[in-house]
């Protein structure tokens, strides 16, 4: 159900590796929890982040959620389309709804992330 | 005659050349060029122009679209939507009280100062505390003031400390007030009874914690029975116990925060003390303290000497001002009139019947709606939508359907520790008949949830407007009228 | 008198349903040792008639109605048309709660929307909130908002901003490790330029000025905005007498980023200081950092226009400790009064009101300064307040004027050194020519 080629975190972020870079977004589970997304607070390009640091925040009408960076790196691009149509995260969370692109600092940190099967198992555990 | 007119905005009714009041003519010689070098405006773009008839009809029609306490039951948890006595309104409208400029010489406002001092004394008796300020404008403002007093004390001791502990069931104003005071908030978990976990508190309470902010009874309506132990744990490490007094209606005249080792608390005059909510304010949030914090109270402090009243600004340890002037004077008068009307027995009866009414509703709805915590509750109880979720119905749908029954819904989605919450606080000013009407409506809705969930999901049906698109409002904010074309 | 509609019989039925024998049992969760064993020591209950007598008697202990006053300094006496009390005291406006259930609160929400619109129109900015507590906390919130937007620790506040506003700013900022710097004024009564440029640097988030300021002098908002913006800082303007906006150019059009202030002049009686009415407006791009509730327009499922509270993720009930402010209950009913008042006056009414205030104050200033030894202290242009300097300490002159039934103005010496012989005098449309002439005559006698 969840794309095999992505990494996942327990905070419901996904990460797609592209060479030395990675794209980050929130998972389908997260967007369902939030409901209709109305605003995304994006970071500045150039911002340097440690793993688990808050990267962005996503707002629905009645809640706000922080998006944490799965790995350390530097922001090299943000999804500008989100300022006009934040709901693309609801429609296509793993594709067009990407949030930031970073340059990975340390590829070893990828080992700490979950693969699709692990993430799905984790979600099943949450429902109980 | 039901108002079926769709009321436009005043700007849409407006047309040039009208005014709804006639001002007196100029009676001094006019000078030109008084403001020669100052940018002036030729007009106030879009400003309305209507006659008195249109103005009056506009507001009368708008008023008819509002549900209010004077119309019906308003069981919002932790808001204490009790009846607002009309004698209070009359007193607060007396010219002796409305027409005084706040900077008049003290000698000319002895009546006003005496009334404020009297209210202070009565509130101290009710709360069992030593000193009080009436300056804060609302509960949240009182919370901020209370936290500032705590911080000032710790700073004077040499270390402001870093953290404030707040239960996960707390109202949002608690953490935001602590944060505004420069503290980092640490959450304390609630236990299976919905009260503060003593183990968690022991673990988190250190000498870097300035205070614990506690609502008592808490937002579930549960009294923190361990309050004295809680106070001891906090005091042992030199911290303060702050009490959020929003739920005082549950225990006024029955028990006093001051007797529970509370060091500082705020009151909401617009809750327990019957002053009206006015669509969102004004309220008033007095802060009462134990002697240890008295030197830090905001200025000015009202002092009494030989029957004369005096404003003392010479308070070297004061945190300063939290607001202009003295606080919400007219709101204070309403609260004072209320206390004088009820007397000691009357106030006690408030808590007794508030608790009776809430428990009656709780017993009547148990089994029909899910109650997360079995713990006994006082003046409010929190159900959830768990049973109705089986049919795809949420607390939102239940609330919206209540509107079709002519009733205002309970508080939703708060406290955060109960998912899908319905927080019900009837208050003491509801008759058994009105309570039964509410109970019957809630039972009917539970049945509808099983048999016809679509009816709930599309509710409300009979209100002036039906369910509103809040996503649209937030995505494309239109926050003012603008002229088109 | 009890407002409790539960009879003894009702009580018995309800207790039976609950399954307890007495109401006492329902309080068992409150430990014995903290329960009150006797009644509170409060006065015995009064009948409604006695309550009225009580307050009437206390009211008589006030002794100000026989004086003619010229007091301002953050609270202004204006005439309030009868419709304001009449309409605002309707049950449906006095007794509802915050409009969290919009379907049954369209009255409240539409009033807020109209209020926000009027504030935007007056201030020349894009978006306004549903109210703050007062001008003083508005000033503090504006400073904090500027800091959140720019993230620089230096905050500038003009020293000719209302002293109470500055006190509140100081109380709010001192726990947050921020640097508040005061900017002096010059002989025009305006912000001293040299003083400003000395303190304004690129580490500044915001400059807060008041216009008309505490001395009644109108600041050059346009050039202050330019100076601030050149250093990457914001300009916040606080207004304590917004009737001036009926005449003066909107600060938003002159470059102000945030405009806040006290709207008590709009239909609220003096009330011995409260409840009053703070307002705030800002440029569109800053709205997510603006504190307070906001009403927005939307549609319902049938396409009908309606209003809701919106952008709630800024607020405490959602964002908790990361909220823009902790404000929850605001001044909604006061904002309703202001909305009725402004819509009653309307375009022509507000402009005329401002003109009356301006001219009467100018006449008073001219007449008073024609007396020997009395002069304008500051040279800058004023609206309805001005500072005069007298041949002696103001306290002495004030005392003698009081013996003649006149409260001639507010002392300034305890707030500003060098102004011990000065007073702040306020004149509004309630001062008929005869009243102003009476003041002049009384002062003439006092000085001779």
Image (cartoon, coloured by chain):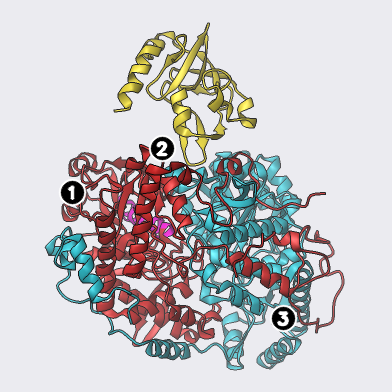
Chain colours: A yellow, B red, C cyan
Q: Disc 3 vs disc 2: which is toward the camera?
A: 2
Residue C93 appears at what percent x and percent y? 54, 68
In which image quadrant can residue C339 be found? bottom right
Q: Residues within 10 Å of mark 3 (few under 14, many from 20)?
A: some
Q: Looking at the picture, do discs 1 and 3 lie on one chain?
A: no
Q: Which residue is mark 1?
A: B233
Q: Nearer the viewer, residue C272 or A92?
A: A92
Tag 1 or tag 2, which sits nearer the N-term?
A: 1
Q: Which residue is mark 2?
A: B392
Subunit under mark 3: C
CA gap, disc 1 and disc 3: 65 Å
Residue B445 appears at what percent x and percent y? 39, 50
Q: Residues within 10 Å of mark 1 (few under 14, many from 20)?
A: some
**Side (left or right) of C185 relative to B336:** right
Asked if residue C57 lies in the magenta stretch, the reply is no
CA gap, disc 2 and disc 1: 44 Å
Q: Which residue is mark 3?
A: C374
Residue C5 appears at what percent x and percent y? 33, 74
Q: Are marks 2 and 1 in contact (CB under 8 Å)?
A: no
SS for dot 3: loop
Q: Which residues are magenta?
A: B140-159
Residue, far top: A19
**Side (left or right) of C249 relative to C170:** right
Which residue is located at x 45 percent, y 46 percent? B397
Residue C69 appears at what percent x and percent y? 62, 83
Residue, far right: B32
Q: Nearer the viewer, residue C159 or C432?
A: C432
């Amino acid at each position: 159900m969840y794309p095999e080629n992505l990494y996942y975190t327990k905070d419901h972020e996904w990460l797609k590796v592209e060479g030395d870079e990675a794209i980050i977004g929130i998972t389908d589970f997260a967007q369902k929890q939030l409901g209709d997304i109305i605003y995304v607070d994006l970071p500045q390009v150039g911002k340097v982040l440690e793993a688990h640091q808050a990267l962005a925040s996503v707002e629905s009408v009645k809640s706000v959620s922080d998006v944490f960076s799965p790995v350390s790196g530097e922001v090299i691009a943000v999804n500008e389309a989100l300022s006009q149509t934040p709901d693309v995260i609801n429609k296509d969370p793993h594709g067009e709804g990407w949030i930031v692109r970073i340059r990975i600092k340390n590829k070893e940190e990828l080992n700490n992330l979950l693969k699709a099967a692990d993430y799905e198992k984790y979600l099943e555990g949450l429902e109980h | 005659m039901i108002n079926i007119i769709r009321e436009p905005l005043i700007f849409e009714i407006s047309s040039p050349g009208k005014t709804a009041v006639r001002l007196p003519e100029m009676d001094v010689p006019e000078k030109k060029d008084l403001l020669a070098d100052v940018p002036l405006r030729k007009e106030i773009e879009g400003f309305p122009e209507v006659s008195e008839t249109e103005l009056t009809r506009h507001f009368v029609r708008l008023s008819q679209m509002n549900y209010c306490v004077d119309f019906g039951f308003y069981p919002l948890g932790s808001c204490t939507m009790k009846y607002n006595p009309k004698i209070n309104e009359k007193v607060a409208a007396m010219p002796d009280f409305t027409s005084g400029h706040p900077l008049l010489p003290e000698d000319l406002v002895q009546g006003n100062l005496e009334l404020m001092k009297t209210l202070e004394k009565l509130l101290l008796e009710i709360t069992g505390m030593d000193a009080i300020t009436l300056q804060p404008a609302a509960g949240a403002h009182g919370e901020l003031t209370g936290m500032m007093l705590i911080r000032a004390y710790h700073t004077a001791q040499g270390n402001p400390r870093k953290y404030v502990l707040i239960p996960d069931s707390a109202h949002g104003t608690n953490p935001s007030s602590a944060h505004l005071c420069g503290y980092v908030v640490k959450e304390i978990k609630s236990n299976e009874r919905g009260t503060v976990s003593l183990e968690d508190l022991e673990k988190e309470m250190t000498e870097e914690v300035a205070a614990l902010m506690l609502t008592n009874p808490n937002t579930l309506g549960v009294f923190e029975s361990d309050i004295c132990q809680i106070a001891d744990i906090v005091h042992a490490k030199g911290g303060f116990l702050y009490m959020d007094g929003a739920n005082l209606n549950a225990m006024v005249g029955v028990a006093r925060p001051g007797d529970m080792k509370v060091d500082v608390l705020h009151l909401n005059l617009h809750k327990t003390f019957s002053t009206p909510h006015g669509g969102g304010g004004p309220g008033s949030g007095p802060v009462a303290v134990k002697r240890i914090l008295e030197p830090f109270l905001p200025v000015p402090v009202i002092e009494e000497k030989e029957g004369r009243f005096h404003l003392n600004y010479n308070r070297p340890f004061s945190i300063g001002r939290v607001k202009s002037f003295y606080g919400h004077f007219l709101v204070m008068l309403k609260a004072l009139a209320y206390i004088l009307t009820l007397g000691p027995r009357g106030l006690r009866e408030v808590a007794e019947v508030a608790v009776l009414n809430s428990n009656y509703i709780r017993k009547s709805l148990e089994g029909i709606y899910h109650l997360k915590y079995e713990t006994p509750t006082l003046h409010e109880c929190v159900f959830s939508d768990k049973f109705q979720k089986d049919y795809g119905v949420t607390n939102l749908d239940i609330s919206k359907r209540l509107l079709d029954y002519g009733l205002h819904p309970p508080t939703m989605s708060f406290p955060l520790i109960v998912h899908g919450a319905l927080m019900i606080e009837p208050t003491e000013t509801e008759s058994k008949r009105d309570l039964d009407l509410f109970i019957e409506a809630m039972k009917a809705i539970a049945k509808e949830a099983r048999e016809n969930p679509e009816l709930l999901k599309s509710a409300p049906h009979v209100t002036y407007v039906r369910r509103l698109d809040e996503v649209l409002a937030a995505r494309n904010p239109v926050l003012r009228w603008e002229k088109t074309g | 008198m009890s407002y409790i509609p539960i009879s003894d019989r009702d009580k018995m039925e309800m207790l039976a349903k609950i399954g307890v024998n007495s109401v006492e049992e329902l309080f068992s969760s409150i430990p014995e040792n903290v329960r009150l064993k006797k009644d509170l020591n409060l006065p015995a209950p009064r009948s409604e008639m006695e309550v009225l007598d009580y307050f009437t008697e206390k009211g008589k202990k006030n002794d100000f109605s026989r004086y003619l006053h010229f007091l301002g300094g953050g609270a202004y006496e204006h005439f309030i048309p009868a419709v304001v009390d009449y309409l605002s005291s309707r049950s449906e406006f006095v007794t509802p709660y915050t409009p969290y259930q919009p379907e049954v609160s369209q009255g409240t929400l539409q009033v807020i929307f109209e209020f926000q619109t009027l504030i935007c129109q007056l201030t020349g900015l894009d978006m306004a909130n549903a109210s703050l507590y007062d001008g003083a906390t508005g000033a503090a919130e504006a400073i904090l908002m500027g800091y959140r937007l720019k993230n620089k620790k230096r905050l500038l506040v003009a020293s000719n901003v209302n002293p109470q506003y500055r006190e509140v700013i100081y109380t709010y900022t001192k726990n947050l490790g921020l640097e508040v710097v005061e900017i002096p004024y010059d002989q025009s009564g305006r912000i001293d330029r040299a003083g400003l440029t000395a303190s304004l640097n690129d580490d500044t988030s915001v400059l807060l000025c008041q216009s008309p300021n505490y001395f009644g002098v109108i600041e050059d908002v346009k050039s202050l905005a330019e100076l601030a913006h050149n250093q990457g800082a914001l300009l916040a303007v606080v207004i304590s007498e917004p009737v001036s906006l009926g005449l003066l150019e909107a600060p938003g059009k002159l470059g102000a980023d945030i405009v806040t202030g006290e709207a008590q002049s709009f239909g609220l009686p003096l009330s011995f200081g409260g409840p009053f009415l703070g307002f705030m407006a800002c440029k569109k791009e800053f709205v997510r950092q603006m504190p307070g509730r906001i009403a927005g327009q939307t549609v319902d499922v049938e396409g009908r226009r309606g209003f809701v509270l919106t952008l709630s993720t800024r607020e405490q009930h959602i964002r908790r400790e990361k909220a823009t402010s902790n404000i929850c209950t605001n001044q909604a009913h006061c904002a309703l009064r202001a909305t009725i008042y402004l819509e009653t006056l309307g375009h022509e009414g507000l402009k005329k009101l401002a003109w009356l205030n301006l001219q009467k104050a100018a006449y008073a200033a001219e007449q008073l300064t024609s007396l020997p030894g009395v002069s304008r202290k500051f040279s800058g242009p004023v609206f309805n307040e001005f500072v005069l300097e007298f041949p002696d300490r103001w306290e002495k002159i004030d005392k003698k004027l009081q013996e003649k039934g006149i409260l001639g103005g507010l002392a300034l010496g305890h707030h500003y050194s060098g102004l011990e012989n000065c007073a702040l005098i306020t004149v509004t449309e309630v001062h008929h020519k005869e009243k102003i002439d009476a003041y002049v005559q009384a002062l003439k006698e006092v000085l001779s």
